Amino acid sequence: MTTTNKPGRPSVDPTDRSPSVYLHVTLNAALYDKCYAAAQRLRMTVPELIRVAVRREITREQDR
């Protein structure tokens, strides 16, 4: 497990103070293109879009 401490990268859970962990995600080209287009519409990067989606899913699971 590789941990990083890069400033400016928000954690998925802002209340969690544990170190960040490097994560590699592989998407097929069609899904990446959809993510890229959505990120552009929302004026964010693809990694930011993925972090928002993960945060939303975690919150949804906690609310169940």
Image (tube, rainbow, N blue to C red):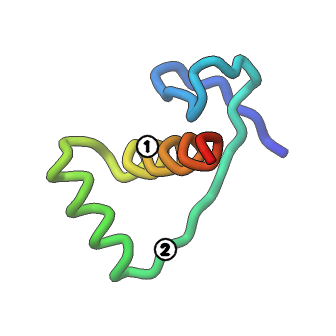
Q: Secondary structure at mark 1?
A: helix
| Residue type highlighted by circle 2 | Leu
Residue at mark 1: 52
Residue at mark 2: 27
**Closer to the camera in the image, 33 or 53:** 53
Determine whether 56 is above or below 9 in the image: below
Determine whether 44 is above or below 25 in the image: above
In the displayed structure image, the side of residue 54 where residue 47 appears, left or right: left
Rendered location of residue 3, percent (x, y): 76, 34
Q: Give the CA distance from mark 2 to mark 1.
A: 17 Å
Of the image marks 2 and 1, the number of the one nearer the N terminus: 2
* Quarter of the rendering containing residue 21: top right
Rendered location of residue 46, percent (x, y): 36, 52
Bin the neighbour count of mark 1 within 10 Å (Cα to Cα): few under 14, some 14-19, many 20 and up. Answer: some
| Residue type highlighted by circle 1 | Val
**Closer to the camera in the image, 10 or 61:** 61
Bin the neighbour count of mark 2 within 10 Å (Cα to Cα): few under 14, some 14-19, many 20 and up. Answer: few
Q: Secondary structure at mark 2?
A: loop
Q: Mark 2 against mark 1, which lies toward the viewer?
A: 1
Q: Are marks 2 and 1 in contact (CB under 8 Å)?
A: no
Q: Which mark is residue 2?
A: none
Image quadrant in which the N terminus is located: top right
Q: Which residue is situated farthest in the right direction here? A: 1
Q: Which residue is situated farthest in the front direction here? A: 64
Give me the residue at 65% from left, 24% from top: 5
Give me the residue at 68% from left, 45% from top: 22
Q: How many marks?
A: 2
In the displayed structure image, the side of residue 1 where residue 8 appears, left or right: left
Rendered location of residue 15, percent (x, y): 63, 18
Rendered location of residue 56, percent (x, y): 48, 45
Q: Which residue is situated farthest in the left direction here? A: 41
